[in-house]
Amino acid sequence: MTDGLSPPAPPRFFGAGWMLGAAQAQRWMWTEAFCQWTRRPLPSESYARRLGDGQRFELRRGPWMSVLVPMVVFSQFVDVLVAQGFIHVAADPAHRLALHGLLLFASLWTVVWAVALRSAMRHVDHVLGEHALTLAIGFKQLCRIPLAAIANVQLIDHKAARGSDDWYDVHELKPRDVTSLTSLDKPTLLIELRSGANDAWWTRNGARKPLRRRIAVYVDQPAAMRDAIVTRSRP
């Protein structure tokens, strides 16, 4: 993971950065869930401090994040019982034990993922600093945008979408035109970069990714964040 101040150095081998980032993400996930359950200091809290000082904007009240853990636990309780019963009846006895174990591990991984994701989203905020905006989606995604590179900021209007339309149609955009920085909740703020803004960057699982000119991101209070960015970006 990067420290939030500079992009990661390019890996020496193709795919090495992604593999290292994915392994790091798994370590963060299991550690976050373990510390959450045992009431120890959370990795997400120390990670959030590394993003620097500034005005913080939360991501904890999204509709998906609010019900994620109860929904996942309930679904796993029901689905696992049904699947385990099916395996006991239909599976080859020689493979039955391995399938039971694999299913239990997959169920545990899903619960750990949900607990760690919601915990990280509740402790890692977007940070509007003196010279740059840092957008963080838990441990997984990180984007840093110099304020001088921001051309426009607007709210995403989901209520205006009708029928088969979505917010892309409302704002006359295509998904290929936008970098979406969200986890499960729909983005609420659209940030447009100036042409040729090469200082902005984005990483996913620690690997640098191409950043499009428009960035869609979820935040609990999009209007407040938009106003703060516009005020801070003025010459």
Image: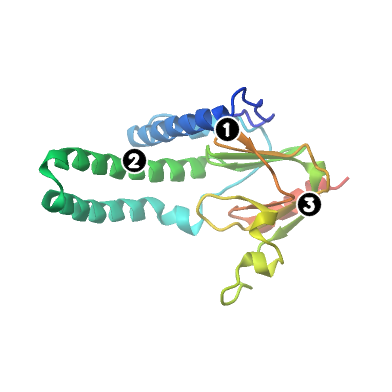
Corner quadrant of residue 199: top right
Q: Residues within 10 Å of mark 1 (few under 14, many from 20)?
A: many
Quarter of the picture holding the N terminus: top right
In this view of the protein, which residue sits in the foreground, 114 or 228? 114
Q: Which mark is residue 109?
A: 2
How many neighbours does mark 3 have within 10 angstroms: few (below 14), some (14-19), or many (20 or more)?
Answer: some
Residue at the disc numbered 1: 206
Of the numbered discs 2 and 3, the one sitting upstream in the chain is 2
Q: Is residue 153 above or below residue 101?
A: below
Under tag 3, what secondary structure? helix
Quadrant of the rendering where the C terminus is positioned: top right
The residue sitting at 23% across, 51% down in the picture is: 80
Q: Nearer the viewer, mark 1 or mark 3?
A: 1
Number of numbered discs overlaid on the protein picture: 3
Q: Position of residue 145 (x, y in %)?
A: 73, 41
Q: CA distance from mark 2 to mark 1?
A: 21 Å
Q: Residues within 10 Å of mark 2 (few under 14, many from 20)?
A: some
Judge from the rendering whether residue 80 lies leftward or rightward of residue 217; answer left or right: left
Q: Which residue is mark 3?
A: 230
Is residue 61 depicted above or below 168 in this figure?
above
- Separation of marks 1 and 3 at Cα, in angstroms: 29 Å
Sequence-wise, the earlier of marks 1 and 3 is 1
Where residue 58 appears, as percent x and y from the top left, is 57, 48
Kindly identify the amino acid type of the residue bearing the numbered disc 2. Answer: Trp
> Looking at the image, can residue 30 be seen?
yes
Label 1 sits on a secondary structure element that is: loop
Left/right placement of residue 167 relative to residue 113 reads right
Q: Say left or right for 23 vs 92.
A: right
Q: CA distance from mark 2 to mark 3?
A: 41 Å
